[in-house]
Image: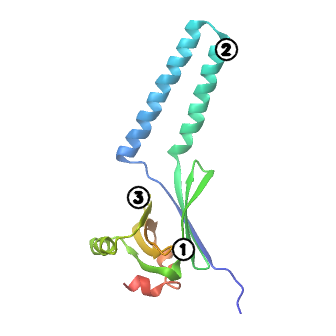
């Protein structure tokens, strides 16, 4: 028996566009104005303690806001288990989904007929890990989770992913 582990993985960086980008910019500008007002108020009070507190609060705001501008999705297949994780600020990793590809009922690129099929199935949970990055195709996966609920996962895939997943769930890819 072959004891090797088959691993395939890739990452896609979230493209900041439209309303999300405007929201990030507005949030940053508003917090900058608040920090400037706090520093100005501390200077007018002529209090070293107030100035230090305002400076510390400004640093905390900057440190908490900056990591949200860089988001990546990490996709990995390891021995038939497809794992999707969201990486924020290159250090905070949160697993979005872990799916056994042998239990997938539908795996394909997103098309109108696939979306209507998913709507008819009425999944209990829906997760999205779409980044709109170049070189990736928006794809959809319909699967049953550990609690026997029907779930749908929207994610980015490339041709290498479909080749790797074909060995684990060929019936789901023909549906």
Name the residue rendered at 67%, 80% in the picture.
5
Colouring scheme, one of rainbow, by chain, secondary structure, one colour: rainbow
Asked if 103 appears above or below 154 in the picture, the reply is: below
The image quadrant of residue 27 is top left
Q: Nearer the viewer, mark 2 or mark 1?
A: 1
The image quadrant of residue 84 is bottom right
**Disc number at residue 49?**
2
**Mark pair 2, 3: CA separation:** 47 Å
Q: Quadrant of the C terminus?
A: bottom left
Q: Are marks 2 and 3 in contact (CB under 8 Å)?
A: no
Q: Residues within 10 Å of mark 1 (few under 14, many from 20)?
A: few
**Mark pair 3, 1: CA separation:** 29 Å
Q: Is residue 69 visible?
A: yes
Name the residue rendered at 53%, 84% in the picture.
168
Asked if 4 appears above or below 99 in the picture, the reply is: below
Residue nearest the viewer, comparing 144 with 89? 144
Q: Residues within 10 Å of mark 2 (few under 14, many from 20)?
A: few
- The outermost residue toward the bottom is 1
**Disc number at residue 132?**
3
Which is more N-terminal, label 1 or label 3? 3
**Mark pair 2, 1: CA separation:** 54 Å
Which is more N-terminal, label 1 or label 2? 2
Asked if 101 appears above or below 95 in the picture, the reply is: below
Name the residue rendered at 52%, 83% in the picture.
102
**Disc number at residue 146?**
1
Which is more N-terminal, label 3 or label 2? 2
Element carrying mark 3 = loop
**Residue 81 image point, x, y percent:** 58, 75
Name the residue rendered at 54%, 18% in the picture.
38
Element carrying mark 2 = helix
């Amino acid at each position: 028996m072959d004891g090797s582990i088959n691993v395939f993985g890739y990452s896609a960086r979230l493209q900041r566009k439209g309303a999300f980008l405007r929201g990030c910019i507005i949030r940053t500008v508003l917090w900058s104005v608040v920090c400037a007002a706090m520093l100005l108020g501390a200077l007018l009070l002529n209090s070293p303690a107030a100035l230090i507190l305002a400076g510390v609060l400004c640093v905390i705001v900057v440190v908490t806001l900056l990591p949200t501008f860089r988001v990546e999705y990490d996709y990995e297949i390891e021995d038939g288990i497809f794992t999707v994780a969201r990486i924020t600020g290159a250090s905070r990793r949160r697993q979005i989904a872990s799916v056994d590809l042998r239990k997938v009922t539908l795996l394909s690129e997103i098309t109108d007929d696939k979306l209507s099929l998913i709507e008819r199935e009425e999944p209990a949970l829906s997760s999205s890990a779409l980044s709109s990055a170049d070189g990736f195709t928006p794809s959809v996966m319909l699967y049953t989770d550990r609690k026997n609920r029907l779930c749908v996962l929207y994610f980015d895939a490339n041709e290498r992913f479909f080749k790797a997943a074909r060995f684990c769930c060929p019936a789901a890819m023909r549906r």
